[in-house]
Amino acid sequence: MATAAPVEIAAMRRAIELAARGLGHTSPNPVVGCVVLDSEGRTAGEGWHRRAGGPHAEVYALRAAGERARGGTALVTLEPCNHTGRTGPCAQALIDAGVARVVYAVADPSPTATGGALTLAEAGIEVEGGLLADEAAAGNEAWLTSVLRGRPFVLWKYAATLDGRVAAADGTSRWISSPESRADVHRLRAAADAVIVGSGTARADDPQLGVRIAGLSDDEISRPLRVVVDSGASAVKAGARVLDGTAPTLIAVAEDADAAHLEGLAPIVRLPRAAEGRGLHIPALLQALHARDVRSVLLEGGPTLAGAFLAARAVDKVVGYLAPVLLGAGPAAVGDAGITTIAEALRLDVTETARLGPDLRITATPIRHSRPEEN
Ligand SMILES: NC(=O)c1ccc[n+]([C@@H]2O[C@H](COP(=O)([O-])OP(=O)(O)OC[C@H]3O[C@@H](n4cnc5c(N)ncnc54)[C@H](OP(=O)(O)O)[C@@H]3O)[C@@H](O)[C@H]2O)c1
C-alpha cells in the first residue's frame, strides 16, 4: 500500500503485537489489535480483543484515546466489523468517535461481519485496507482458516528422534525432546482452543494435557478443551489425568459405544465411525468441535491418529521437534496416511526452523494439491 505513512506502518505492527495477546482466549472470534493515532500521528490509544463476548479491540483503543481520536487515524489488524453481535458494530464506534481515517490489514471474510469498510467510507471516513496484510493474516491464521474451511484450524505437533521415531519399541516415549521443546509445546497448547490425542496415547501415557507456562499465573493461562478420541470408550477411565478437573475435557466416542462408565466423569460426544479403517470420522469430529466454538486444534498424536488426520487432508500446519537421539526401533512419527506410492507423497513447505536447546524445531505447511479434503 503506497499511501501509509511510516508512523502508520509502525502503529500497525504494534496492533499486530497487541492482537497476539488474545490468542487462545477469543474463539469463536478472531484476535484483533488496534492503535489509534491522534491527528498529529501520536499514539492516543491501544487495545486488543481480550476474550469472546468482551469489547472489540477498536472499543478499547477508542476508550483509551477519548477525545484525541477525533480527526485521528485508527489502525486495525482486521476490517472493523459491521454487525451487532454480543457487542455493537465497531464501524459505528469509529464513526461516533470522529476518526478521519481507518487503515486495516486484512479484509473480514466472515459473512456476518463483513462490510465494515464500506460503512466507514459511506460515513465519509478515508479507508484503506491491506497494510501489513500478510503479517496480520499470519497472526490470525487459525481463525482465517476456520472461516475458509468451515472447520477448526489443525496444527499437528510431534516430537521425534533424529530417526523419526516417537516412542521406543516398548512404547515408552518420555522424554524424547528437551525441556525447551516441551515448554514450547505448552505455548502451542495455550494458543489452541482444543488439544487432541488418540486413545492409544491416552492408554500409553495417561497425559494430563494441561498448560503450564513459567511466569504466568493460573488466571493468565488459557485452558484448552482436552479431547480424547476414543471410539470404543475404553481408554479413559476414572482416575485418568485428563479427568483431573483443571480444564474442560471431552471424550469423542462412536455412536454405538458403551460409555456408561463415563457418566458424571466427562462430557462425551457421539460420532460416526470412519467409513474405512479404524476409529471415528475425522471431519465429523472437527465439525463437532467447530459447533463447540473451537476454531483451533493442537493435534498431539499419536501416530495412528495423526495418519488419519493427514489422510483426511485435515492438517493445516506441522510442528516437528527433532531431538538428537536415535532409537533404531519404535513407531514412526506418523502412521498410515493412505499414501501408497511416492507420487501421492504429501509435500510440505518449511516456513521456519529454530533451535530449542539441543533440538531442532521445524514448522511446515502442507502444499495443497488436487486431492480434496474429506468431508
Ligand atoms: N513423541 C510424540 O510426539 C508422541 C505424541 C503422542 C503419542 N506418542 C506415542 O505414540 C504411542 C501411541 O500412538 P498410537 O498410534 O498407538 O495411538 P494414537 O494415535 O494416540 O491413538 C490411536 C487410536 O485412536 C483411535 N482413533 C479414533 N479415531 C481414529 C481414526 N479416525 N483413525 C485412527 N485412529 C482413530 C483408534 O482407537 P479406537 O478405535 O479404540 O478409538 C486408534 O487405535 C505411544 O507410545 C505414545 O507415547 C508420542
Image (cartoon, grey):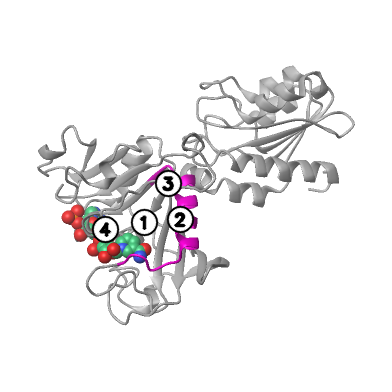
Residue named by callout 3 = 211
The residue range painted magenta reads: 173-194
| Disc 2: residue Cβ within 8 A of ligand 1's nearest atom | no
C-beta proximity under 8 Å, tags 3 and 4? no
C-beta proximity under 8 Å, tags 3 and 1? no
Work out whether residue 302 can be spotted. no
**Discs 1/4, front:** 4
Mark nearer the N terminus (2 vs 1): 2
C-beta proximity under 8 Å, tags 2 and 4? no
Mark nearer the N terminus (2 vs 4): 2
- Residue in the image at 68% along x and 20% along y: 93
Gap between marks 1 and 4 measured at Cα: 12 Å
Q: Is residue 235 left or right of residue 128?
A: left
**Discs 3/1, front:** 3
Q: Name, please, the residue furthest toward the bottom.
A: 328
| Disc 4: residue Cβ within 8 A of ligand 1's nearest atom | yes
Return the residue nearer the eye: 375 or 138: 138
C-beta proximity under 8 Å, tags 3 and 2? no
- Where residue 300 is drawn, which disc sits there? 1
- Where residue 284 is drawn, which disc sits there? none
Specify the amino acid type for callout 3: Val
Mark nearer the N terminus (3 vs 2): 2
The verdict on residue 356 being magenta is no
Image coordinates of residue 94 in percent, x first then y, are 71, 23
Place residue 260 in its image quadrant.
Answer: top left
- Where residue 185 is drawn, which disc sits there? 2
Image coordinates of residue 285 in percent, x first then y, are 29, 46
Structural crowding at the residue carrying mark 2, measured as other residues with C-alpha within 10 Å and reported as few (<14), some (14–19) or many (≥20): many
Specify the amino acid type for callout 1: Glu
Place residue 270 in its image quadrant.
Answer: top left
Residue named by callout 4 = 205
**Discs 2/1, front:** 2
